[in-house]
Image (tube, rainbow, N blue to C red):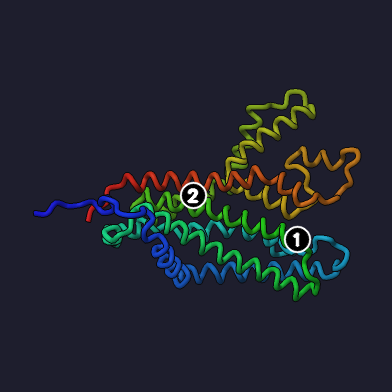
Amino acid sequence: MAAKVEAGRLPREGSPWTGLWAVVAKEMADYLTGVRMLILEALIVLTAAGTVFMAAENLRTTVGQDRFLFLRLFTTQRDPLPAFIGFLAFLVPLIAIALTFDTVNGEFNRRTLSRVLAQPIYRDALLFGKFLAGLFTLTLVLTAIWLLVFGMGLVRLGVPPGGEEVARTLLFLLATIFYGGVWLALALLFSVRFRQPATAALASIAVWLFFTVFWGMIAQGLAQVLVPMRYGLLQEALAQDQVARALTRLSPITLYSEVMMALLYPSLRAFGLIGVLLQFQEGVILGAPLPLSQSLLLAWPQFTGLIAVTVLLFAISYISFQRQEIRA
């Protein structure tokens, strides 16, 4: 009887990335034509159009008076709808999780993974291709929404955006893509670790809910224990706020929200209690905007943090996938 050869462990001939773009093209075609993605696209387009339309109605009276009018399309809210950035922070993780929670374990359950790896496609190319396909699909969707927001702004407001506004929103779009990349990598990790897609989806959503609902309260409670307010001094309040912010920055949601605030609120000079105190500092003009370079410098640690978390989660997924036994 012929010995069984483990798929994906054949002696390598040529580059380990052979077949990478074939995997990317196939996965992107599946994502963009699937019913799941069409439902998500319709949901996010409707929410984007509704929030931006309501924001534009509020801003039409301030045309010519606001230097950063187009930025306010992303941040202005009108009851009963929240601001557009609020919808993005909520929907982007769900879209990312929906794309990749079954990308590997689905192949296991359909018993197609060993057949794919029996072709001249290695594990490296397969996993990296699936992740890139999800990231490219998310980038395509978010870019289309970004263009939709600007198009509606041009139609409703009747004025073009400034160069700095375009640059700030482009950086915001890039940060949103990497924010989605964190949840793509997390869902991919659970897809590798759990054989049942339902388990992977529930684990991913549980992590998202934990950071969305509970982590802020836990971080605040830990800060009160680690740095208690003994005498009610300002220095104690600042120290406690810094510890709480350091703990909350373990969440990608906090990192993304701070990048978003630094880029879309040009007058922001610092985060937390320090930012509030700086508004009353002598010589600081209340509400005066920072140049883009200074806002980017303020957001750079959080921006690199999002990239680092994405790379770390994908690396763990890669190592775990390489160690799994897959036999033809």
Residue 248 to residue 176: above or below: above
Query: Few, some or many C-alpha atoms within 10 Å of disc 1 (few <14, some 14-19, many ≥20)?
Result: many
In the rendered view of the protein, which quadrant contains the N terminus?
bottom left
Q: Could one spot residue 34 in this view of the protein?
A: yes
For this rendering, which residue is in front, 73 or 209? 73
Pointer 1: what residue? Answer: 165
**How many numbered discs sit on the rendered protein?**
2
SS at circle 2: helix
Question: Taking 252 as reference, is 103 left or right?
Answer: left
Q: Position of residue 235 (x, y in %)?
A: 77, 28
Residue drawn at (61%, 65%) of the image: 143
Residue drawn at (69%, 64%) of the image: 81
Residue at the top extreme of this rendering: 230
Question: Taking 251 as reference, is 186 left or right?
Answer: left
Residue 234 image-quadrant placement: top right
Q: Position of residue 300 (x, y in %)?
A: 66, 45
Residue drawn at (58%, 49%) of the image: 212
Q: Amino acid at mark 2?
A: Ala
Residue 254 to residue 42: above or below: above
Q: CA distance from mark 2 to mark 1?
A: 36 Å
Q: Could one spot residue 254 in this view of the protein?
A: no
For this rendering, which residue is in front, 207 or 160? 160
Q: Which mark is residue 206?
A: 2
Question: Taking 152 as reference, is 312 left or right?
Answer: left
Q: Earlier in the sequence, mark 2 or mark 1?
A: 1
Q: Amino acid at mark 1?
A: Glu
Query: Few, some or many C-alpha atoms within 10 Å of disc 2 (few <14, some 14-19, many ≥20)?
Result: few
